[in-house]
Amino acid sequence: LAKTTQPISMDSYEGQEVNITCSHNNIATNDYITWYQQFPSQGPRFIIQGYKTKVTNEVASLFIPADRKSSTLSLPRVSLSDTAVYYCLVDAGNNRKLIWGLGTSLAVNP
Amino acid sequence: DAMVIQNPRYQVTQFGKPVTLSCSQTLNHNVMYWYQQKSSQAPKLLFHYYDKDFNNEADTPDNFQSRRPNTSFCFLDIRSPGLGDAAMYLCATGTSGYEQYFGPGTRLTVT
């Protein structure tokens, strides 16, 4: 069963690129990797999902190496409003297990 | 355009008094999830429905039950709330294997 591990906290400054890495050593063949953002007193919000290599959307990029045992969420040029908790999720899909990481609390400073 | 709606947003109940939280969706997703989230912790999946199929997590206490009368609605019943059940309860919907859409949550206080 996949277990996800991610840093508890990170600090950054406005305008910098932030990379948050999640390890999932026991990821299964059919598992997807999904990242969510959560602000206080709100539900998590989907950021990006990937299976392998690189995925990019309007807010982030997700890098997944060939062995898929880790993934890196990349947030380009963060702003103060990106201060939030970021969760890595391994999603087996097909009505199977969801494995959430404990979350990385990102603080963006002026 | 609200997509996942949770009512109420705040709920206060007494120790041992049954309480029901509700969730509705306008997305017509076949999967609905209930999570419990305590302060500074990750969401903890309690159970989910895949269509009408109920899937309980192994460590979800029997005190927590769920009902899904139709595609749009799902309920979380806490039969005898304890002080340890005070938390944010999140409902989410999805099409298994893809992104989940979360509601705003219901914050439950047990007195």
Image (cartoon, coloured by chain):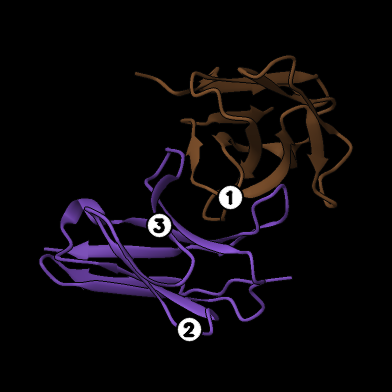
Nearer to the camera, A72 or A57: A57
Is A8 in front, or is B97?
Answer: B97
Distance from the alpha carbon under mark 3 to that under mark 2? 27 Å
Q: Is residue A4 left or right of residue A96?
A: left
The chain letter of the brown chain reads B
Q: Position of residue B109 (x, y in %)?
A: 62, 29
Q: CA separation, marks 1 and 2? A: 20 Å
Residue A40: quarter of image: top left
Residue that numbered label 3 is attached to: A85
Q: Is residue B101 left or right of residue B72?
A: left
Which residue is drawn at the image coordinates 42% and 38% (left, top)? A42
Residue identified by numbered label 2? A66
Drawn side of residue B15 relative to residue A50, left or right: right
The x and y percentages for residue B110 are 68, 29
Report helix, strand or loop for mark 1: loop
Chain A, chosen colour in render: purple
Q: Quadrant of residue B30?
A: top right
Q: Is residue B41 above or below residue B77?
A: below
Q: Residue at x 55, y 81 (%)?
A: A69
| Closer to the camera in the image, B65 or A72 | A72
